[in-house]
Every structure is written in structure tokens, then in C-alpha cells.
Amino acid sequence: MVKLIPYVASLLALGQAIAAAKAVTSFSEWVDGILEDPAGDNMTPEEVIVAYKSGQFSTPPAAKFSHRSLIQKRATCYEQPNTECLIVDAVACINAVARRGANDCRNVYTQCQLNTAAMTTDGKTDSSCNDVARGGGFILDHCTRAGNDWVEGSEYAYGNGGELVRLRKAGV
């Protein structure tokens, strides 16, 4: 039995190391991980929600892409009353869009509709799904509020910066 203790301790340490490797500190960081390696060891949407609700996320991060100036960081939150969607549904939509492939979001209005959430773009500009997903992550980073399960907001897609991404209540 004494010989089992080091093995159990090693397995626990390995489990903690794997969890730490997957850990992220923002929704944007999570989206970037999916985009960089869709088959990689990324957190699931459920794990992201647990990390967010347990306070593991830091203050909203600066955008990873340096071609955006501070003036361009223009997430708008809670624009219309009663149009919020559940954060868990918004995360699931962003996950679906991020895994769709770079070009599958071009000239499409409804990018995702799942339970209470709808993720839309204006459908006029050629934005990749990567750029749309990054816009969604930015919305979550800047529009979620501690202790609240609901979110609504908009942000221009990364890349061309001319296509508005919205997260809101489905059917609105």
C-alpha cells in the first residue's frame, strides 16, 4: 500500500498539469486556442463556463492582434432591453462558429442559433468564421457581468473590421 501512494500522487499531479495546460483566462483566449488548433486540447464550452463562473477569468484582455487600435475596440453591450441570451448558449454558438472553418461564414446573416442565443453578422462583408468567432469572444470578455448568466452585445469582426457581430436573444 505504501508503494501506491507515490503513483497516486503522480497521477494527481499529471491530472493537474493537464488541466492547467487547458486553462484559459478569458473567452478570447479560449477562442484563439480553438482557432490555432481545433483538434488540440482546448477547453469544452462547459469547462469554459465553469472557469468563468469560478472567477478564473481575468479582466478583459487586450486584443491579440496589434492592427486594431484602442479607438477600434468598440464592443457595445446591452444595446436593447430584453434581448439578452444565456452566456452558456453564447459560448456554445461561438464554439460552433470557431470550429466551422475559415471561409464558411462569408455572406451569411445567422451564424449560429442555439437555445436562447443567436450570433449574427450583417452578411454584407466577407469575414471568415475565425474573425466572427474572435468578435464573439471579445463581446463575452467585455459584456459579461459577474453574477449574471445573461449577455448581449456587438463588436466588429476581426480582420476587416467592417462586419458587425452580434450576440443576442434568438428570434430578436
Image: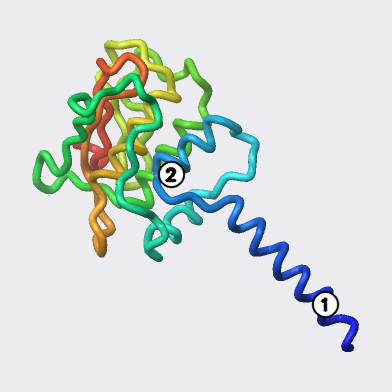
Where, by quadrant of the figure, is residue 50 drawn? bottom left
The crowding category of the residue bearing disc 1, from other C-alpha atoms within 10 Å (few below 14, some 14 to 19, many at least 20), is few
Label ID, residue 6: 1
Please tell me whether residue 134 is drawn above or below residue 127 in the rendered image. below
Residue nearest the viewer, comparing 85 with 62: 62
Please tell me whether residue 146 is drawn above or below residue 82 in the rendered image. below
Could you tell me residue 113's position as x and y percent? 36, 36
Quadrant of the drawing holding the N terminus:
bottom right
Q: Amino acid at mark 2?
A: Ala
The crowding category of the residue bearing disc 2, from other C-alpha atoms within 10 Å (few below 14, some 14 to 19, many at least 20), is many
Circle 1 SS class: helix
Point out the tag, 1 or 2, that comes first from the N-terminus: 1
Quadrant of the drawing holding the C terminus:
top left
Label ID, residue 92: 2
Q: Is there a contact, CB below 8 Å, between mark 1 and mark 2? A: no
Q: Amino acid at mark 1?
A: Pro
Where, by quadrant of the figure, is residue 161 drawn? top left
Could you tell me residue 93's position as x and y percent? 40, 39
Could you tell me residue 147's position as x and y percent? 25, 64
Circle 2 SS class: helix
**In the image, farthest residue toward the bottom:** 1
Please name the residue shown 47% across and 43% down the image.
Answer: 30
Please name the residue shown 40% across and 47% down the image.
Answer: 26
Could you tell me residue 57's position as x and y percent? 39, 55
